[in-house]
Amino acid sequence: MANRSALFLLAYAAVELSTHAFAQLPQPDGGAVQPGHLPASWVTGGPNCLEMQDWEVHQFNPDFFILRESGCTNYEKPFLYLIFGKERALLLDTGAGPAQTYDAVYRVVNRWLEKSGRTSIPLVVTHSHGHGDHIEGDGQFRGKPGVQFVEPTVAGAKEAFAIKSWPDTNGIIDLGSRLIDTIPIPGHQEASIALYDRLTGILLTGDSLYPGRLYVNDWPAFKSSIQRLVSFTEGKTVTYILGCHIEEARQPYLDYKVGTKYQPEEHSLDLGRGELLELNAALQKMGSTPARAAFRDFTIWPKEHK
Ligand SMILES: [Zn+2]
Ligand SMILES: [Zn+2]
């Protein structure tokens, strides 16, 4: 009996370790999320802009699409996310000027409808935050039939996602058998928000964490936001952390300078929770003194962003 108890305790300790201490899963089985794939590389901007499409569309899986704006249209070349539930679709961001975003998005929506044997689906248009390179196409969606438009403001996000106390409580949106958590993360910009898609385990972090220059406008707010993201993700399956730009090169600690269109050796889009923890640890260590600091996959950059 003593041996059996000891074995039980050992097994219990192992489960505790695997599910709590490391906050992850007991088995390497894919994590019971909807799988998908990311491309090995993305089109950036050129080298010959005459050959470029305005948008690159990537199907992560049949209900999750990533659109990247061409660097030939705007050097910011942001990533947009289009996610389908059973009752609604959600678009995160509308691009940098002068983008023809509506047509590109509805080409995907219409193909999805055709494939699903449906004739329409309402589209929620919302934003990672309110900077110009993420809202330029807003006018193409606002007031359009079938579009629920969320203004890129704190008030807009609070109302749309039922966030009671900004930024301390999270909200949620149900796209129909698809719940997406919305986590206020002001600091890069006052209306910054992260989205967590429970079906794929993807965390969308906008301009607050991506392989590039993390511009911090409100240092105390940014620090708290990143800490809240760490707490939120504790114990959850996080398959990919996807932001809205790539500015780092594949070479560690190296970025492409502001304004670069063509990035033939750019970093992958995805980061993981390890980078989130690394960012949080660095911010905690810096305390109340903002400082620029380069890391392998991102750079902390306290300054005005546009
Ligand atoms: Zn921004
Ligand atoms: Zn941006």
Image: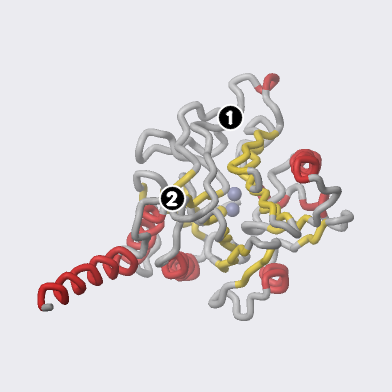
State the residue in front, 136 or 237.
237
Q: Residue at x 58, y 42 (%)?
A: 60
**Nearer the observer, 218 or 127:** 127
Instruction: Please name the residue that numbered disc 1 is placed on.
Output: 43
For numbered disc 2, what is the local secondary structure?
A: loop
- Colour basis: secondary structure
Q: Position of residue 57 (x, y in %)?
A: 66, 36
Type of the residue with mark 1: Val
Badge 1 local density, few (<14 within 10 Å), some, or many (20+)?
A: some
- Distance of label 1 from label 2 (alpha carbons): 28 Å
Disc ID at residue 16:
none
User: Are the two marked residues, 1 and 2, in contact with CB atoms closer than 8 angstroms?
Assistant: no
Residue drawn at the location 63% of the way across and 47% of the way down: 64
Q: Residue at x 50, y 42 (%)?
A: 269
Q: Report whether 282 appears left or right of 89.
A: left
In primary-sequence order, the first of circles 1 and 2 is 2
144 shown above or below 169: above
Q: Secondary structure at mark 1?
A: loop
Q: Which residue is mark 2?
A: 30
Number of numbered discs on residues: 2
